[in-house]
Image (spheres, rainbow, N blue to C red):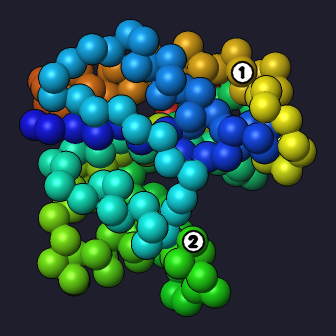
Amino acid sequence: MKTLVVGLGNSILTDDGIGIYVVRELAAHCQRDDVDVAEASVGGLRLLDTLAGYERVILVDAIQTRGGSPGDIYRLHPDDLRVSLHAGSTHDLSLPGALAFGRGLGMTLPLDENLTIIAIEAEDVLTFCEDCTPAVSAAIPRAVEAVLAELERAENPVRAAGPESPSAGSG
């Protein structure tokens, strides 16, 4: 299954660049013909061109949640994300909304069950800095391992007896 791993973010906004830093590290450890690695500083509809044509996609991005600790890592799917009902710009359109729109236009996009998000809890996404905060930077090796585990899961799918938790934090 042709897979794309995309690091999302802005590498000059402190922890917002974590997705990019994770895929850069991943690229140094993962040399597979069936896996492409890319960086993107876009979202919403503009992300669709990057995802088009792939059967499976793993997005790596920063997240800020209530109660999360910087460096926590979550495994999410599009249905775990809030769906926006309207948007002021194409960047504001939620991932589920953008995927639905792209599919409606006939784009070849991965099915929701073949799209996983590895999200790293961010501390600071507003300060101009090319380095992540210490706790988020320390999560990079664990996030790379989470992506590698996700790639392995895609090769050897195992069905659990019960419903899988949509996210799992690790501290």
Residue drawn at (22%, 45%), measured in percent from left and top?
A: 56
Residue drawn at (16%, 64%), measured in percent from left and top?
A: 108
Q: Position of residue 120 (x, y in %)?
A: 61, 36
**How far, Cα to Cα, is label 2 from label 1?**
26 Å
Residue drawn at (17%, 55%), measured in percent from left and top?
A: 53
Q: Position of residue 91 (x, y in %)?
A: 57, 71
Task: Name above or below for residue 13 compared with residue 108.
Answer: above
Q: Position of residue 107 (x, y in %)?
A: 19, 71
Q: Position of residue 33 (x, y in %)?
A: 16, 23
Rendering quarter of residue 12: top right
Task: Name above or below for residue 147 compared with residue 56.
Answer: above
- Tag nearer the camera, 2 or 1: 2
Residue 20 relative to residue 104: left or right: right
Residue 116 relative to residue 81: left or right: left
Rendering quarter of residue 58: top left
Residue 169 in view, yes or no: no
